[in-house]
Amino acid sequence: MMTKDLQEQILKLKKEKDACIFAHSYQSPDILEIADLTGDSFALSVKAKAYACKTVILCGVRFMAETLKMLCPEKTVVLPVADATCPMAEQIAPERVLAFKKEHPEFAVVAYINTSTELKAVCDVCVTSSSALQIVEKLPQKDILFIPDKNLGSFVKAKLPQKNIVLWEGFCPVHNAVTLEEVLAAKAAHPSAKLLMHPELSADAVRFADVVGSTADILRYAMTHEEDCIIGTEKSIADYLSLVRPEHRYYPLSKKLMCPDMRITNLSDVYHALNGSGGLEIELDEALCRQAKRPIDEMIRLGS
């Protein structure tokens, strides 16, 4: 079936099933075109409740679908591909955090939203890459354990020297793989281009950026400025920008910046998730859901 035909079938099914499609910005353009809501994790989290649909098809990875289920327990939330996970979300064991909290009760535990439901349940507040600085600065505690992403944590730590931020060895395997040499080579190849970088990249790499920000921040800058840009996050963002602004140049920072989990979902998966022949319906234990929702609610409160 041709892409347009499949998109039309999906749009028809959406109406029949009283469903909405939410898609992370890293999804392919053909999925973004039919989505009711697109954006980074923060946008998907905060805006979810504004939609009255009975079912949400979440095109992204599992922690995002679980977060939506926590915020909208009355909705049916379906992840089109059960294997779409985030390696970083599983890097820190909840038991390790509980042991740290017992030894250091004065610390606030801040969890990047790219974490499992079980880990969120033992943390104090969640953050996204777009809200981390604002939220950590607002916390009354000076002592902060920031998990799991050491790179985003390093960025926050450098910006907030008044805080005592402890980092653990977690990271996004895709962003963390980009080397300083690749950054310098990209700048040398495109000297007039602005370098836009996600804080999940290593601290060594990020110090050469012209702009550091979330996926939404990167898109916002690129869409509102006339300069050519080197895009230092998932390659799909450079592809999308090149599609919607063909008169400008958008260069991927590295060929490594391709997330296999974000790219695993295709239009056919969305179609099958809608008609009930595929996908994973997200179901969470009620008590665990209540515990994990607490730091998300706190993220929304402090990030507003």
Image: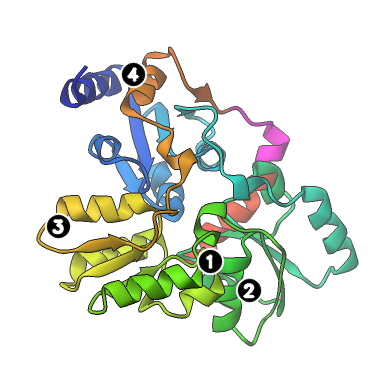
Q: What residue is shown with label 1?
A: 302
Question: Cα distance, mark 1 to mark 3?
Answer: 34 Å
**Earlier sequence position, callout 4 versus callout 3:** 4
Depicted 110 relative to depicted 160: above or below:
above
Q: What residue is shown with label 4?
A: 17
**200 left or right of 37 in image:** right
Q: Residue furthest right?
A: 103
**Earlier sequence position, callout 1 versus callout 2:** 2
Disc 1 + disc 2, Cβ < 8 Å: yes
Identify the element where label 2 is drawn: loop
What's the amino acid at mark 2? Leu
Residue 165 is situated, as x and y percent measured from the top left of the image, at 69, 76
Question: Cα distance, mark 4 to mark 3?
Answer: 34 Å
Q: What residue is shown with label 2?
A: 139
Question: Cα distance, mark 2 to mark 3?
Answer: 39 Å
Crowd around label 4: few <14 · some 14–19 · many ≥20 (10 Å)? some
**Earlier sequence position, callout 1 versus callout 3:** 3
